[in-house]
Amino acid sequence: MDIKPVFDQLAATIGSIPQSGLLIIAVAAMLLGWLGAALARREIFVGRVMSTGSTLVLCGVLVLIVLQLARLDPRFDVAMSEVGLPEQSVVGGETRVELAPDGHYWLNAEVNGVPARFLVDTGATLTAISADTAQRAGLEQRRDRLPVTMTTANGTITVPSTTVDELRFGNVAAFGLDAVIAPNIGETNVVGMNLLSRLAQWRVEQGTLVLVPNNPQTQEVGTKPKS
C-alpha cells in the first residue's frame, strides 16, 4: 500500500501549523478525548465520535514526527521506500579528502549543479546549507516538514528543512538528501552525519579522510540509480 499521498497531505496540513499552534491542537485533542471518554461511559454516541477524532488527530501528529525522525537513521531507508516515501541514497566510488591547513576537511561539491564548498562535520546530525547556496541551487523550504531545532554558537535556533536532489563531490553522489537551510552560518555549508552514516564506511588514514559508499556504482557517478 502506497501511503505517500496520504502522508504528503497530512504533512502539508500539520507542517503549515506553527509549533505553538501544533501544541495547542495536541492539548485540545487530549481534552476532547477526555471529554469524549466521559460521555461515552454514559453511552452518549457523540462521546465516541469525539474520542475517536481525538485519537486520530494525536496519532496523525505522532506518525508524522516518527516518520520524519526515522529519515535521520539510514537503517530505516528500506522501510521508508517500502511505504512510498522518497529514499535517500549515496552512491559512487571511494573519495579521499586531504586535511586542510586549518585542521578541517573541506569538499568542493555541487548542489543541484551549483558549485559549493562544504565542511565535513562529524558532530552535525544533519547536512546544513547556507541561505546563499540554497538560493543559488534553487532549494526551497519544505512546507510539509516540521522545522528542525539546531544548537549553534549563538544559541538554539529553529531552521527549515529542504531536500537536495543531487549533492556531488569527488566520486560520491547523494540523491534526495534531507538537509536544513541555516541562514546564520554565513557562506559555510556542512556535510553532516545523515550523509556520512549512509556510506559503507568513512575513516581517517594518516590525515586523509576516506569516504567509501555502499555498493560502489559502475555507472557514471552523476547518474541517479534506479529504484
Image: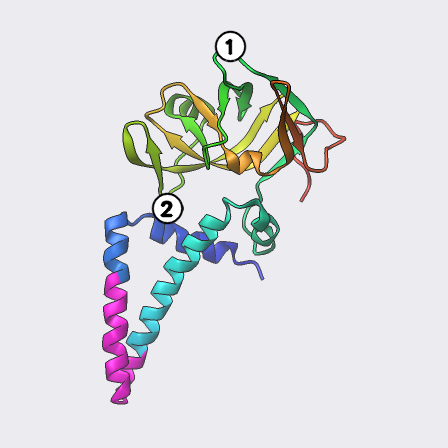
Based on the picture, tell me whether residue 34 belongs to the magenta stretch: yes
Q: Quadrant of the C terminus?
A: top right
Nearer the observer: mark 1 or 2; the answer is 1
Helix, strand or loop at disc 2? loop
Q: Position of residue 185 (x, y in %)?
A: 36, 23
Please name whichever residue, 150 or 226, is drawn nearer the observer in this view of the structure.
Answer: 150
Amino acid type of the residue tagged 2 in the rendering: Leu
User: Main structural element of the magenta stretch: helix, strand or loop?
Assistant: helix
**Side (left or right) of 171 relative to 42:** right
Please name whichever residue, 48 or 9, is drawn nearer the observer in this view of the structure.
Answer: 48
Please name whichever residue, 216 or 218, is drawn nearer the observer in this view of the structure.
Answer: 216
Q: Residue 146: which disc?
A: 2
Q: Position of residue 90 (x, y in %)?
A: 62, 35
Based on the picture, tell me whether residue 169 belongs to the magenta stretch: no
Residue topped by disc 1: 101
Mark 1 crowdedness (10 Å alpha carbons): few <14, some 14-19, many ≥20 = few
**Side (left or right) of 10 relative to 216:** left
What whole-number distance in Å separates the C-alpha atoms at marks 1 and 2? Answer: 38 Å
Q: Is residue 5 above or below residue 157?
A: below
Q: Residue at x 51, y 35 (%)?
A: 193
Q: Is residue 43 above or below residue 165?
A: below
Q: Residue at x 35, y 42 (%)?
A: 147
Q: Residue at x 57, y 50 (%)?
A: 76
